[in-house]
Image: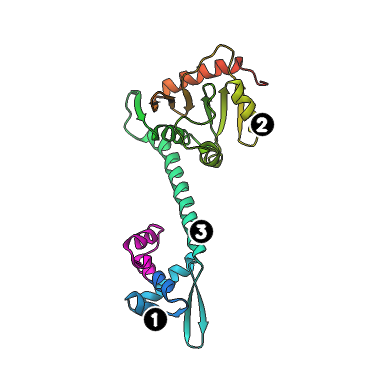
């Protein structure tokens, strides 16, 4: 059986967590050898002892190894592999925070870019990724703002999204971004969603009688996302401040007529 510690894939995964290559080599050596001296780890990793000291210090800071001072010198103890899982989770959280910081920065940069007359940008998405793409675009809304949603009858999940996507992924990310929701939906949706409104930072109202909504609708910032299903999910995103403002006004008109009691 191939040793996964020696595979290039394993090394690349470790470096993707932000570990320098020398630290990765030392970590793999420590995992393979168990508690060892710096000299033995350096020898196993194929590097000189001076470089190994710096590489191992990075591993200590990451919590992947511990060091013990003995009469014979420093001894390195690799931590449990569960520590590696925690490092990956923390790295993922840092990457997510960086992504949202960039998303938040972009609107602040726009006034300083060359001014152009607005032309609506229309993006088409098809297939299984359409639902996820449109839902996640709504998460780009300015933190603290409100996403306005309209959902069609008899559909509790986002068209084409994996089962429980709303509960397990979309809603937790939305709450982390401090995004609230105004939801217009049929009575069946209201009965299911309203009890969780406070917990999930949402206000749900029942669509006025006679409304037939063909697509799921998301209105946020300067975009409108439309999602519906024929043979497969189809989504359209219209990026236009004027169109988004118009859709928001139309939404508010319907909202004022919608029932808040079910």
Q: Residue furthest top?
A: 210
Residue at 48% across, 34% down:
141
Residue 102 in the image: x percent, y percent?
A: 42, 43
Q: Nearer the viewer, residue 226 or 147?
A: 226
Q: Residue furthest bottom?
A: 71
Looking at the rendered structure, the secondary structure element under dot 2 is helix
Give whichever of discs 2 and 1 has the lower sequence position.
1
Residue range in magenta is: 1-25
Residue 45 higher or lower than 133, as above or below: below
At x 46% / y 55%, what residue is drawn? 91
| Label 3 secondary element | helix
Q: Position of residue 33 (x, y in %)?
A: 42, 76
Q: Which mark is residue 195?
A: 2
* Mark 1 lies on residue: 40
* Residue behind mark 3: 86
Cα–Cα gap, marks 1 and 3: 27 Å
Q: Height in image: 61 above or below 120? A: below
Measured in 3D between alpha carbons, the distance from the residue under mark 2 to the one under mark 3, in whole angstroms, is 34 Å
Residue reaching furthest front? 1
Tell me the SS state at disc 1.
helix
- Decide if residue 162 is on the left or right side of residue 110: right
Q: Residue at x 59, y 14 (%)?
A: 208
Residue 19 highlighted magenta (yes or no) = yes
Taking depth in this image into account, of 116 and 225 the one nearest to the observer is 225
Residue 81 vs residue 120, the one in the foreground:
81
Earlier sequence position, callout 1 versus callout 3: 1
Q: Would you say 209 lies left or right of 29 here?
A: right
């Amino acid at each position: 059986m191939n040793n996964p510690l020696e595979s290039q894939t394993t090394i690349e995964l470790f470096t993707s967590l932000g570990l320098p290559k020398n630290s990765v080599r030392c970590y793999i050596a420590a995992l393979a050898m168990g508690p060892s001296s710096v000299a033995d780890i350096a020898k196993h990793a194929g590097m000189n002892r001076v470089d190994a000291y710096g590489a191992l210090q990075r591993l200590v800071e990451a919590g992947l190894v511990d060091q013990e001072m003995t009469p014979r010198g420093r001894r390195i103890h690799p931590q449990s592999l569960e520590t590696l899982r925690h490092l990956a989770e923390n790295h993922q959280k840092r990457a997510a925070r960086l992504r949202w910081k960039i998303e938040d920065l972009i609107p602040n940069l726009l006034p300083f870019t060359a001014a152009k007359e607005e032309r609506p940008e229309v993006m088409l998405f098809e297939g299984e990724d359409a639902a996820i793409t449109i839902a996640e675009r709504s998460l780009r809304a300015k933190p603290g703002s409100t996403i306005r949603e309209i959902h069609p009858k008899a559909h509790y999940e986002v068209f084409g999204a994996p089962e429980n996507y709303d509960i397990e992924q979309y809603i937790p990310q939305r709450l982390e971004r401090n995004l609230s929701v105004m939801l217009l939906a049929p009575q069946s949706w209201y009965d299911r969603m309203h009890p969780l409104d406070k917990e999930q930072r949402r206000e749900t109202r029942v669509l006025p009688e006679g409304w037939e909504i063909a697509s799921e609708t998301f209105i946020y910032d300067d975009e409108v996302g439309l999602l519906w299903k024929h043979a497969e999910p189809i989504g359209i995103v219209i990026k236009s401040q004027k169109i988004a403002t118009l859709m928001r006004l139309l939404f508010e008109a319907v909202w004022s007529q919608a029932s808040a009691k079910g």
